[in-house]
């Protein structure tokens, strides 16, 4: 009797340990949100810097107490938008090839290539950008340096490829065979079937992929830091302008910042965090409606 | 007819897009290999990044050379990519070693240096001690700068050899062990992988067990899944910020191996939870029922039946996680620092391979070196990819049964 009781107690304890482990993810998320917001909102709460001039300023000069991130937001958004514009069509068509047209062997090879592309650390994309894309942009640029919005867009476009390809491919493969057969039976060609039946049916999955791609592009730091130029002021006016996305602002200066300067770097993180949260909710929304259907 | 043309056109565009994706990969990997391969060799992997200077004390002796002069010429510790031979080597009896004069290229500066080309088996150099009496490991290819306070700079090889041979008694030699390698970064990466996995793997696996085996579907499970999803969507620089505020500042772990690996462990959590959950779900319910019917408790069932079946899936999770740690940079930049050294304790900083690649590309503008580090990283990534493929194939085999 005693032995069984002890056994039961042990099972109980271990179950609770498992429960605790499962909660770590939630706790971490809460802790991250708390610490970033706590530090990031402090300068506005204590009135050591005005929120308005933080959000609308176009100069970041810690030396002369000017901390404006509006031009960084613009830079981040433009770079992400450009990357989506270039990267998404290529990625979706690649996914179409893998899911619909490739034989099993070719599909395997390309899938492996995409996985490898996803596995390459972002720093190396940056090194590649610095070694190839930046010098090339410099050749056609009227500016004196190749680090620019254009170079950033290209690097990010490459970096979102694996995310969008793999998620789109999964959702294309999930489209029931009957859809295609029905389309063929109506006399449609393979290409027509792909573009009129399969792609629309996989729409929500592809959208999820695109939004995750946006998330990756806007949150990318190390690769971008090497190719964007990081100016201290100025809204980008052309493709060849230098930009300073939110992420690189944090990574560049966090190492030595202190006081208000450091807190405002956390505030930059808060702005980035808000962007990411919006993206996360969008994904969740899409996934939910898909399940609903 | 019109439809055929349109179809061919569309097909062409699809092929083109796939071609672009493939060629981008080949181009990047090709660029990194072509640019960096010139620097990758054994020394690159085994040297520290920074050169180390030490003064060593050696008891002069009379050690005859045991190999003949022709063979001495073949003793060639220098590397054409780092050094080019100017003169030598010449054997010196008093230290039982041969030195050679080389043109030494250390990143940018080209300098003439005397390097140790050959060491006799009973050379006094092998018993070299520093001022505190600790043994110093002198190897071929180390640079000899000074002897008994006499700078060897501007001497010819013969003069330098004569200078060293003239000295007797206890010799005080300034030795420089050349840098330019990534040994410390490889070891830091290894530490980082081990430490973060030790933290994240149990948390992730136990969490996944709770979600699949214990929790009833509902709000609670959904909350945890949502949190895990959110975590996987957060960019690593935000994790870095958190790590800096919490581990580095609030818990006073400083910028260190420990702060870095704790931060990375949180990044790994969602990956491990999800992969383990998937693996656990593939284990048929009948297995559990069978085990329970035999009188096993739930815990016994989980550890003796369910987990062993899910091993390939968990292995995939581990491999994926290793890949994540190796590739992680932004979070580590803020929490583990950019110091190229082997961390002595959990609380000392150290830069992993990726952070070092960033550092040399950004701060030193040395793309070749960054690419050379990149080759090491890509090789690791490819090996991990192949292994995880192997593991997931194993899982598939199990499923088919």
Image: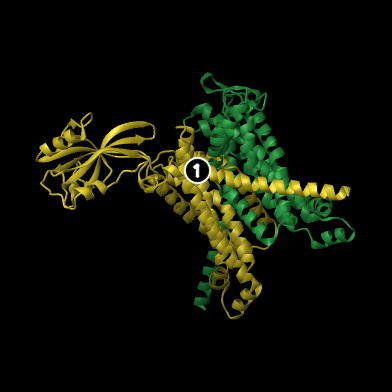
Chain colours: A green, B yellow
**Relative to A65, residue A108 above or below:** below
Q: Is residue B290 above or below residue B49?
A: below
Q: Residue at x 88, y 47 (%)?
A: B2
How many dots with numbers?
1
- Asked whether B242 or A147 is in front, the reply is A147
Q: Residue at x 51, y 38 (%)?
A: B245
**Chain under disc 1:** B
Q: Residue furthest front?
A: B70
In the image, what residue occupies the spot 75% across and 55% down? A172
Decide if residue A124 is on the left or right side of residue A207. Answer: left
SS at mark 1 in the image:
helix
Q: Is residue A67 left or right of residue B379?
A: right
Up-down relation of residue B109 to residue B395 (above or below): above
- Would residue A143 be visible to someone looking at this image? yes
Residue plotted at (70% across, 55% down): A98
Q: Quadrant of the C terminus of chain A?
A: bottom right
Disc 1 target residue: B34
Task: Give the x, y percent position of residue A49.
Answer: 59, 24
The part of the image, by quadrant, that contains residue A275 is top right
Q: Residue furthest bottom?
A: B294
Residue A278 position, x and y percent, is 70, 41
Label 1 Cα crowd, 10 Å radius (few <14 / some 14-19 / many 20+): some
- Residue B335 in view, yes or no: no
**Place of residue B166 in the rendered image (x, y in percent of width and height, measured from the top left):** 10, 37
What x and y, as percent, mark residue A169?
Answer: 71, 54
Q: Which of these two is toward me, B400 or B4?
A: B4
The single residue placed furthest to the top in the displayed view is: A64
Q: Which residue is nearer to you in this view: B66 or A16?
A: B66
């Amino acid at each position: 009797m005693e032995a069984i009781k002890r056994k039961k107690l042990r099972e109980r304890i271990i179950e609770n340990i498992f429960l605790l482990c499962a909660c770590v993810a939630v706790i971490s998320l809460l802790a991250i949100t708390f610490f970033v917001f706590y530090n990031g909102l402090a300068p506005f709460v204590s009135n050591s810097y005005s929120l308005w001039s933080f959000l609308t300023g176009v100069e970041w000069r810690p030396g002369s107490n000017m901390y404006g991130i509006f031009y960084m937001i613009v830079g981040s958004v433009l770079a992400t938008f450009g990357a989506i514009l270039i990267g998404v069509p290529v990625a979706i068509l690649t996914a179409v090839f893998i899911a619909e047209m490739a034989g099993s062997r070719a599909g395997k090879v390309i899938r492996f290539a995409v996985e490898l592309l996803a596995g390459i650390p972002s720093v190396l994309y940056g090194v590649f950008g610095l070694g190839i894309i930046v010098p090339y942009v410099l050749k056609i640029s009227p500016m004196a340096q190749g680090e620019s919005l254009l170079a950033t867009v290209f690097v990010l476009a490459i970096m979102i490829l694996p995310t969008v390809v793999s998620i789109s491919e999964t959702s294309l493969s999930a489209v029931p065979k009957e859809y295609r057969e029905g389309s063929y039976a109506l006399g449609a060609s393979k290409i027509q079937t792909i573009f009129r039946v399969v792609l629309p049916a996989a729409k929500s999955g592809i959208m999820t992929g695109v939004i995750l791609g946006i998330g990756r592009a806007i949150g990318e730091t190390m690769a971008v830091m090497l190719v964007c130029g990081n100016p201290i002021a100025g809204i980008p006016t052309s493709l060849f302008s230098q930009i300073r996305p939110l992420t690189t602002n944090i990574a560049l200066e966090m190492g030595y910042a202190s006081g208000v300067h450091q807190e405002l770097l956390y505030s930059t993180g808060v702005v980035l965090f808000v962007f990411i949260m919006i993206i996360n909710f969008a994904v969740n929304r899409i996934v939910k409606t898909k399940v609903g259907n | 007819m019109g439809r055929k043309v349109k179809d061919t056109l569309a097909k062409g565009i699809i092929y083109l897009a796939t071609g672009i994706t493939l060629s981008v990969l080949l181009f990047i990997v090709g660029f990194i290999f072509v640019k960096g391969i010139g620097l990758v060799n054994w020394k690159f992997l085994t040297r520290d990044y920074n050169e180390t200077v030490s003064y060593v004390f050696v008891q002069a002796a009379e050690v005859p050379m045991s190999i003949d002069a022709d063979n001495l010429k073949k003793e060639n510790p220098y590397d054409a990519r780092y050094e080019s031979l100017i003169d030598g080597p010449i054997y010196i009896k008093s230290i039982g070693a041969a030195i050679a004069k080389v043109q030494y290229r250390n990143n940018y500066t080209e300098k003439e240096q005397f390097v140790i080309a050959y060491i006799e088996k009973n050379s006094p150099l092998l018993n070299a001690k520093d001022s505190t009496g600790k043994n110093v490991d002198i190897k071929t290819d180390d640079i000899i700068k000074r002897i008994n306070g006499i700078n060897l700079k501007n001497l010819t090889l013969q003069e330098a050899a004569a200078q060293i041979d003239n000295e007797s008694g206890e010799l005080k030699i300034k030795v420089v062990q050349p840098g330019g390698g990534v040994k410390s970064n490889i070891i830091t990466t290894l530490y980082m992988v081990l430490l973060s996995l030790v933290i994240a793997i149990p948390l992730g696996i136990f969490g996944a067990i709770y979600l699949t085996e214990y929790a009833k579907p509902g709000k609670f499970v959904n909350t945890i899944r949502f949190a895990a999803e959110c975590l996987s969507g957060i960019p690593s620089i935000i994790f870095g910020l958190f790590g800096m505020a919490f581990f580095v500042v609030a818990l006073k772990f400083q910028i260190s191996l420990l702060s870095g690996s704790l931060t990375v462990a949180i990044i790994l959590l969602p990956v491990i939870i999800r992969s383990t959950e998937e693996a656990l779900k593939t284990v048929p319910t009948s297995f559990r029922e069978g085990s329970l019917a035999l009188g096993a408790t739930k815990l016994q069932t989980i550890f003796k039946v369910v987990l062993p079946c899910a091993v390939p899936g968990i292995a995939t999770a581990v491999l994926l996680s290793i890949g994540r740690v190796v590739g992680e940079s932004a979070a580590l930049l803020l929490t583990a620092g950019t110091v190229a050294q082997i961390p002595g304790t959990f609380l000392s900083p150290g830069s992993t391979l990726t952070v070092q690649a960033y550092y040399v590309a950004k701060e030193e503008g040395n793309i070749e070196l960054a690419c050379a580090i990149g080759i090491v990283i890509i090789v690791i990534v490819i090996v991990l990819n192949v292994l995880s493929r192997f593991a997931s194939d194993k899982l598939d085999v199990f499923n088919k049964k």
